[in-house]
Amino acid sequence: MFGGLCLCCLPSLLRAEDVASPRPAPTVEVASAVYVRHGLAEDSSAANHGAIANLGFIVGRDAVAVIDPGGSLFDGISLRLAIRAITQLPIRYVVLSHVHPDHIFGAAAFKADGAVFVGHARLPEQLAARGEFYRRGLEKILGDGNVEPAVAPTLLVRDRTELDLGDRALVLTAHRPAHTVCDLSVLDTRSGILLTGDLLFVDRIPVLDGDLKGWLREMESLRALGVQKAVPGHGPALVPWATAEAAQGKYLRALLDDTRAAIAKGTSIEDAPDIVARSERGNWQLFDAYHGRNVLEAYRRLEWE
């Protein structure tokens, strides 16, 4: 059932019936040998096992690279089973696109593969500061025994790094503070598809946990690459880059401009969420859940500029 997974190397899989019952995650092949597991437009819950982010994997001639292993051990096992339903090639790399738990807490499912875990150069410090807090919070949602400790990267990307899958090269870029302070993007040079992690949100409201102005700058630098299609961190499995990036940029610029205007008028940080970028409310799922927090993050940084 576990597609060759060595259970002796992952004893935690046996601690809870819920974790022992994953099935292969449904995936879509968005380009030749590029697969995406579409995440749900929800918050993590016991019912969805934290499967709320888009996950990807790319199959080369010699090996497989995973781009984000999922939001829980259950989610990671499901992704691994999906890979094993398609290929028995070694899983050589597991890319951790940033620190947020919905993208990385499935990593333990791939430890027995001997994979190289790849992350931004600042990811270790972020995991040290937040990893256990995230784990405890996720365990409260998913249940005891369903969340392994975060897996630290063993290969750090400080600028750009190329991963070789045999006949296929992936170019990883470490971004300056944007969505978070430790974002990686992955460009598949064969298909030209950019796997963005949470640098790009579609339909679901973007979440600011880094630097608003920096995020806009990093999107501009990605735009210069001439990418046509992208896999966003949340949203459809594959989107036209220009349309998706424009929609996100419109929200981020409204957040920036309206927050600056609120500060200039003397609007308090407590009142700012009621007036900043409210015109965007109808454009995004989960707007009411996350927009206020975005305004607070933006206000705290911008009031001192």
Image (spheres, rainbow, N blue to C red):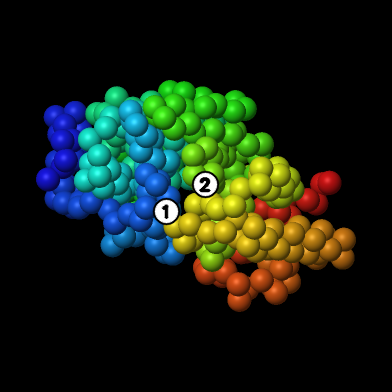
Q: Within 10 angstroms of label 1, few (less than 14), some, or many (20 or more) residues?
A: some
Residue farthest right in this picture: 264
What's the residue at 44%, 64% (across, down)? Answer: 41
- Indicate the amino acid at tag 2: Ile
Residue 46 visible in this rendered orientation of the protein: yes
Mark 1 → mark 2, Cα distance in angstroms = 9 Å
- Indicate the amino acid at tag 1: Val
Examine the rendered structure and indicate whether residue 29 appears above or below residue 93.
below
Q: Within 10 angstroms of label 2, few (less than 14), some, or many (20 or more) residues?
A: many
Left or right, 284 with reference to 234: right
Left or right, 278 with reference to 167: right
Examine the rendered structure and indicate whether residue 273 appears above or below residue 80.
below
- Marks 1 & 2, CB-CB < 8 Å contact: yes
Left or right, 70 with reference to 15: right
Image quadrant where residue 80 sits: top left
Residue located beneath label 1 in the image: 30
Count of marks overlaid on the render: 2
**Residue 187 drawn at (x, y percent):** 53, 39
Q: Split into 4 quadrants, where in the image is the N terminus?
A: top left
Residue 193 got which mark? Answer: 2
